[in-house]
Image (cartoon, rainbow, N blue to C red):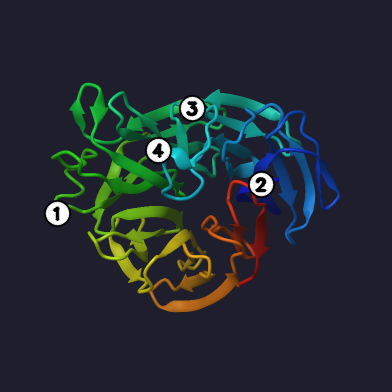
Amino acid sequence: MRIDDVAVLGHGLVAVGTVTGPVTVDEVKLVPRASTTPFLLRLDEQGHVAGGAVLDGLPHGDAWLLVATGPADNVVIAGPATIAPGWEGDHAPEGTPFLASIGLDGTVNWQRPLPVQRVAALVVGRDGSIAFTGTFKEPVGTITSIVARWSHDGTAVWQKTLGDPVSADHHWPAVVRSLALDGEGAVIVAGTVYSLWPGHLDLGQGAVNPRGEGGFIARFRADGNVLWSRGIAYGEPYALATAGDTIAIGGEVRCGSEAEHAFVLAMDNQTGAARWARRFPQPRRLIGRVAVAADGGVAFTEWGHEVEEKVVVGSVSRVGEPSWTRQIFAPVNGPRLPPRLVEAPAGPVLLTARNSPLRDVGRLVAFVK
């Protein structure tokens, strides 16, 4: 059994993953008809499993899955996904790209093929609309990102391929690593600009990286038009969340041969102006996920690559002052995935995994701020 992703329901959580044989979790039995079958679990507000089902109607295989929830406990699942923010290519298991609407009893309401090979991020808006981003490999080997918005019933509304065309058959890379839907229905994306060829990323309002900025962020209106776009000096922004008038970004600073450092950045949703930025001094520690609280504060997870590293959960206030930090998990037997994080009514909820991410079982950890 492997838990891949978690999202907040109206009264609890939903978790998705894959199971390779019969398993019982809190008296809920999951019995797949074939090996490596997707499943869904419902958890109550105390973290107890309240129900679940194997999803025989979805593509089977060792594909990492993402889940997002919307109004009326609408559950949307997509795969195959990258197994961690910013992890590309061979790190993601092969599988049939799909997006599906799922009932809490495991019923597949609808299923659609995806125009990408790997899904990087998935989100459902307040009106049930769906936004996702993913990558595909062009004939020349270039990895290119697609950003799309679909209606609640799986009908495509708009789709954009990011990056400037170099020739008729490929773009120079602009890889979107995360996205969010805000309260106005706008799609916000963040990612990395790769300067493998001369040129700049222009989303319709001029180059976002005129000074060689390694990262970018853009906000698209509900109809797909760009509201604003900005370059980010930090080169690897792969965690993104928004609530109210705040956008939070987390990721990795890459400065040539210097050691990598984690960063968290808060921005104004309407203008894209930066409010504050915090760079974490410890090398080789990365941001796993970020979440925005109702008061505009930013919660984050910080983790390390090494066996002895610990996972830290922390919060920064709206004005950029540290609020609290807690060590919540000590790894066992080697590297593991960065912890996933969602902002729930009772406080942040985290999903962590131990040992090899492709073999070990994830653990849900919840606490109140």
Q: Secondary structure at mark 4?
A: loop
User: What kind of residue is marked 2?
Assistant: Arg
Q: Earlier in the sequence, mark 4 or mark 2?
A: 2
3D distance between C-alphas at marks 3 and 1: 35 Å
3D distance between C-alphas at marks 1 and 2: 43 Å
Residue 69 at what x, y percent from top left? 60, 44
Q: Secondary structure at mark 1?
A: loop
Q: Which mark is residue 114?
A: 3
How many other residues sit within 10 Å of disc 4, few (<14), some (14-19) or many (≥20)?
Answer: some
Q: Which residue is mark 1?
A: 211
User: What kind of residue is marked 4?
Assistant: Ala
Residue 195 sits in quarter? top left
Asked if residue 303 lies left or right of residue 199, the reply is right
Give the residue displayed 55% in from the left and 36% down from the top: 78
Q: Earlier in the sequence, mark 1 or mark 2?
A: 2
User: What kind of residue is marked 3?
Assistant: Leu
Q: Which residue is mark 4?
A: 222
Residue 349 at what x, y percent from top left? 61, 61
3D distance between C-alphas at marks 4 and 1: 29 Å
Give the residue displayed 17% in from the left and 38% down from the top: 197
User: What kind of residue is marked 1?
Assistant: Arg
Q: Mark 4 or 1, which is nearer the eye?
A: 1
Q: Secondary structure at mark 3?
A: loop
The answer to the question of whether label 2 and label 3 lie on touching residues, with beta carbons closer than 8 A, is no
